[in-house]
Image (spheres, helix red, strand yellow):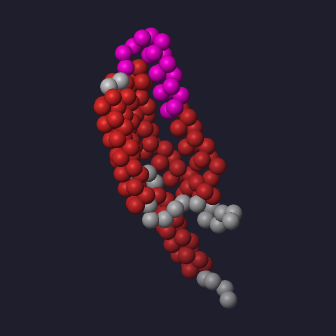
């Protein structure tokens, strides 16, 4: 039985639409990056006070807040993207993004510490937080583009 070309085109269009739906459902939303940045800033600032109860509160807020953010994110994602859809380039992009932010934070933290700048870790985390807030959505847009550019019938 031969499938008419128009039916094949419609089926492919439906597959592309479904894939786009899956990809869009699983991208990390902008609010996640903002929430994690705010939690990180509060945690690091709390630690640098060196006041026991402030450290305890900052740790508790960070832990519960991060748990709540991750739980909200997981509940939002109805399906899971296969590793083959994100591909090696996508994984390397994510690792590069994370490594760049870690390098900036650690580098600035050590530099501020060497210069005896007050609250060096808190100041160093500011550009990291900005990098998450500004770079996170760009990372997601790039990953979306990568995932949607992959062939529909990838390797299994």
By secondary structure, the bulk of the magenta-drawn segment is best described as: helix
Percent x, y for residue 2? 66, 85
Point out residue 37 in the picture as x, y percentages from the top left corner.
38, 38
Residue 76 shown in magenta: no
Residue at 49%, 19% (x, y): give it.
Answer: 110
- Magenta includes 110? yes
Quadrant containing the C terminus is bottom right
Identify the residue at horizontal 66%, vertical 63% (top origin).
154
- The correct choice, above or below, for 132 with respect to 51 in the image is below
Picture quarter containing residue 49?
A: top left
How many numbered callouts? Answer: 0
In magenta, the rendered stretch is 101-119
Residue 56 found in image quarter:
top left
Vertically, is 26 above or below 63? Answer: below
Horizontal side of 99 relative to 136 (left or right) equals right
Quadrant of the image for the N terminus?
A: bottom right
Q: Quadrant of residue 151?
A: bottom right
Q: Can residue 34 be seen in this view?
A: no
Horizontally, is 122 left or right of 17 in the view?
left
Percent of width and height locating residue 34: 35, 42
Question: What residue appears at the point 33 percent right and 41 percent down from the top-left corner?
Answer: 61
Q: Nearer the viewer, residue 129 or 47?
A: 47
Q: Where is residue 30 in the image (x, y as percent from the top left)?
A: 38, 47
Going by the picture, which residue comes out furthest to the front? 52
Q: Which of 14 and 122 is in front in this view?
A: 122
Q: Nearer the viewer, residue 103 or 46?
A: 46
Q: Which residue is drawn at 62% across and 53% down?
A: 87
Q: Residue furthest bottom?
A: 1
């Amino acid at each position: 039985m031969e499938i008419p070309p128009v039916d094949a085109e419609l089926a492919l269009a439906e597959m592309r639409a479904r894939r786009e739906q899956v990809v869009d459902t699983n991208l990390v939303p902008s609010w996640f990056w903002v929430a994690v940045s705010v939690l990180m800033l509060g945690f690091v600032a709390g630690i640098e006070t060196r006041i026991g109860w402030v450290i305890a509160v900052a740790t508790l807020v960070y832990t519960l807040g991060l748990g709540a953010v991750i739980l909200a994110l997981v509940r939002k994602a109805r399906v899971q993207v296969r590793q083959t859809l994100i591909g090696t380039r996508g994984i390397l992009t994510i690792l590069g993004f994370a490594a760049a932010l870690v390098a900036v934070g650690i580098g600035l933290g050590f530099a501020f510490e060497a210069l005896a700048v007050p609250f060096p870790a808190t100041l160093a985390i500011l550009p990291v937080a900005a990098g998450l807030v500004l770079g996170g959505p760009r990372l997601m847009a790039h990953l979306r583009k990568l995932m949607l550019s992959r062939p529909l019938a990838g390797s299994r």
